[in-house]
Each structure stands twice: as structure tokens, then as C-alpha cells.
Image (spheres, rainbow, N blue to C red):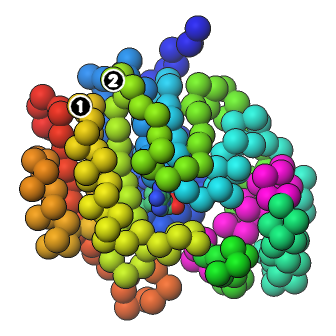
């Protein structure tokens, strides 16, 4: 039995994450309000900004990054962080070594790994999440003056009660006819290294073909490159464009506005 929540409540992302989409929350909320009894599905949940912003009753949330999903699974169980989180280099590199030790020993699905992942995400350079070819976390320490660390995630036990977190390639998800999809793949640009695996142009096409087999309501977003615009048009998405600020980029010159595309399919009306 699912308890319906107060859908007015909206929550902020718990992590810094490249490609965060908080600006899209009001737009998706406006549409999803008509599908409130549908399961909210994110095949690329990342920083979870949309699901936390929408706060659906039931959700299926997937990402290929296993450390991210491990963290959310502990948050869902009311994670309490008992690490001494300090914004200094010695602590950072010590905890980064400890996290990589857990990865090497296949202990990266533990509560300790979830705590370290949260600490590294908040303390590292630009909130990046990057691994070397052996799967070890290799982002240097950030340069923040102050960091507001959160220690107690117990309120999320209730918020995430009926949210399922999974760690797969998007194409392995089991969907049903009552699913509403928000699809936010890595941008079609040079910076697509979110985890060990890259998301290539072939993956962008593979995704659109996979979605094409579904009759579910779908909202997709991406960077509006000419080939993405053409692809989404070819597969009959209704499209809109929006200029949005980009915050995470290691190259200061590449910060600035990005033209985003929003594609909508199998939804009767649009905005
Ligand atoms: C643009 S981000 C999603 C950002 C998210 N919407 C937010 O607001 O924070 C894309 C995500 O796709 C994930 N990803 C990359 N390749 C994937 C794949 N083949 N299957 C599932 N997830 C994948 C990355 O780990 C990354 O978290």
C-alpha cells in the first residue's frame, strides 16, 4: 500500500552533479501533475534534481554510476554520516585513498563508501565525479572557502520510501505501461566522462531507438547540438529550446550559457 505524499513538497539535490536540471523542475511538474498516478522513471538520474524537485510517490531511478546509486540506497535507509568531514587537503586525500581502497577490495557497496562518496563529492574540485581506467576516483581537492556538510539524512527515509534505485545501462530497465519517463542522458558534447564508460554518439542513437519502442509519456533533454536536434525531430519529438547557465566545467572559459533542447513524446498537450 502506497501512502500518497504531500506533492507540494519539493527537495533540493543532495550532491553536486554535472548536468543538474533544477531549472526544468517547474516545466516537468506542470506536465507530471496530470500523470501523478504514474511511476516516475529516470533512466539517468544523476544528481536527482528532477525527482527530488517533483517528489513523486513512486519512482524508478537508475544510473550507471554504482557509487552514486550506493549512496542513494543508504540515504533511502536514513544515512547518518559519522565521518569527521573537514574541508582541508590532508583529510581530503586521506579519505580519497580510503575510498579507493574500498573500491580495490570490492567493499564499495558499503555505508562507509556512501559516506566517503558524499564527502568527496562536496569537497572535490568542482563537484566532479571522475575515475581512471582502473575505476579509481581521481578528482583533486577543491578550493572552497566554506562547505556546508549534511550529516543526517533520516528525513529521506520517508521521502524515498517507494523510490527504487538501480544501477544498470538504461536499456536493461524493466518498464511498464504506467511509467512516466524523464530522460536526461549525458550531453552530446566533448565532456561526457561521468563514469568509467563514455556515452558516445552511438549511445545517443541507441537511446532514441530504445525509447521508440515505448508508448509511455516521455520528456527528454539534451544539449541542442545540430545532430541531436535532427535526431529528435526524426523520431517525432515535439521540441522546445532554452538557454541555461552551465555551472560545472573545469575550464572557466567554457562556463556560460548552453542551448538545451527539450523533447516531448506521447503527451497529449504541451505546456
Ligand atoms: C546529465 S546526467 C543526469 C543529470 C540529472 N538529470 C540531474 O539533474 O542531476 C547523465 C547521467 O547519466 C549517467 N549515465 C551515463 N551513461 C549511462 C548509461 N549507459 N545508462 C545509465 N546511466 C548512464 C551518468 O552517470 C550521469 O549521472
Is residue 82 shown in magenta?
A: no
**Residue at image mark 1:** 215
Instruction: Left or right? Give the position of 94 relative to 271.
Output: right
Residue 77 vs 210, above or below: the answer is above
Q: How many neighbours does mark 2 have within 10 angstroms: few (below 14), some (14-19), or many (20 or more)? A: few
Quarter in which the N terminus is drawn: top right
Question: Does ligand 1 reach within 8 Å of label 2's beta carbon?
Answer: no
- Closer to us: 164 or 2: 164
Question: Which residue sits at x=57%, y=31%?
Answer: 163
The residue at 35%/64% (across/down) is 203
* Residue 16 makes an appearance in the image: yes
Task: Say which mark, if any, is on residue 174.
Answer: none
Q: Is residue 130 above or below residue 4?
A: below
**Earlier-in-chain disc, 1 versus 2:** 2
x then y, percent, for residue 43: 44, 46
Nearer to the camera, 88 or 28? 28
Query: Which residue: 60% across, 40% down?
Result: 165
Q: Which of 269 and 22 lies nearest the eye of the viewer?
A: 269
Is ligand 1 closer than 8 angstroms to the Cβ of mark 1? no
Quadrant for the C terminus in the image:
top left
Between the residue at mark 1 and the residue at mark 2, the CA separation in whole angstroms equals 7 Å
- The magenta span reads 107-129
Residue 136 in the figure: left or right of residue 86: left
In the image, residue 97 above or below residue 71: below
Give the residue at mark 2. Answer: 177
| Left or right of residue 108: residue 158 | left
Judge whether residue 99 can be spotted in this image.
no
Residue found at the far top of this picture: 1
Residue 256, position as x, y percentages in the image: 32, 79
Disc 1 is placed on an element classified as loop
Pinpoint residue 23: horizontal percent, then vertical percent: 34, 53
Q: Where, by quadrant of the figure, is residue 35 drawn?
A: top left
Amino acid at each position: 500500500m502506497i501512502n500518497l505524499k504531500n506533492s507540494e513538497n519539493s527537495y533540493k539535490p543532495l550532491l553536486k552533479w554535472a548536468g543538474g536540471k533544477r531549472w526544468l523542475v517547474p516545466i516537468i511538474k506542470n506536465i507530471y501533475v496530470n500523470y501523478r498516478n504514474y511511476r516516475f522513471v529516470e533512466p539517468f538520474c544523476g544528481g536527482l534534481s528532477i525527482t527530488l524537485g517533483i517528489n513523486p510517490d513512486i519512482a524508478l531511478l537508475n544510473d550507471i554510476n554504482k557509487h552514486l546509486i550506493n549512496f542513494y540506497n543508504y540515504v533511502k535507509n536514513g544515512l547518518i554520516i559519522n565521518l569527521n568531514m573537514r574541508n582541508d587537503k590532508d583529510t581530503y586525500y586521506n579519505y580519497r585513498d580510503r575510498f579507493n581502497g574500498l573500491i580495490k577490495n570490492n567493499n564499495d557497496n558499503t555505508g562507509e563508501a556512501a559516506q566517503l562518496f558524499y564527502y568527496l563529492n562536496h569537497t572535490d574540485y568542482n563537484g566532479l565525479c571522475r575515475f581512471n581506467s582502473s575505476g579509481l576516483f581521481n578528482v583533486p581537492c577543491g578550493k572552497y572557502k566554506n562547505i556546508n556538510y549534511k550529516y543526517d539524512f533520516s528525513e529521506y527515509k520517508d521521502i524515498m520510501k517507494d523510490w527504487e534505485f538501480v544501477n544498470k545501462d538504461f536499456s536493461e530497465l524493466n518498464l511498464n505501461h504506467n511509467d512516466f519517463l524523464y530522460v536526461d542522458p549525458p550531453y552530446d558534447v566533448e565532456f561526457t566522462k561521468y563514469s568509467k564508460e563514455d556515452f558516445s554518439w552511438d549511445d545517443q542513437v541507441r537511446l532514441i531507438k530504445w525509447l521508440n519502442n515505448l508508448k509511455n509519456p516521455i520528456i527528454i533533454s539534451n544539449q541542442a547540438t545540430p545532430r541531436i536536434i535532427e535526431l529528435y525531430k526524426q523520431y517525432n519529438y515535439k521540441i522546445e529550446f532554452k538557454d541555461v547557465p552551465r555551472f560545472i566545467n573545469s575550464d572557466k572559459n567554457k562556463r556560460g550559457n548552453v542551448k538545451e533542447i527539450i523533447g516531448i513524446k506521447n503527451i497529449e498537450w504541451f505546456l
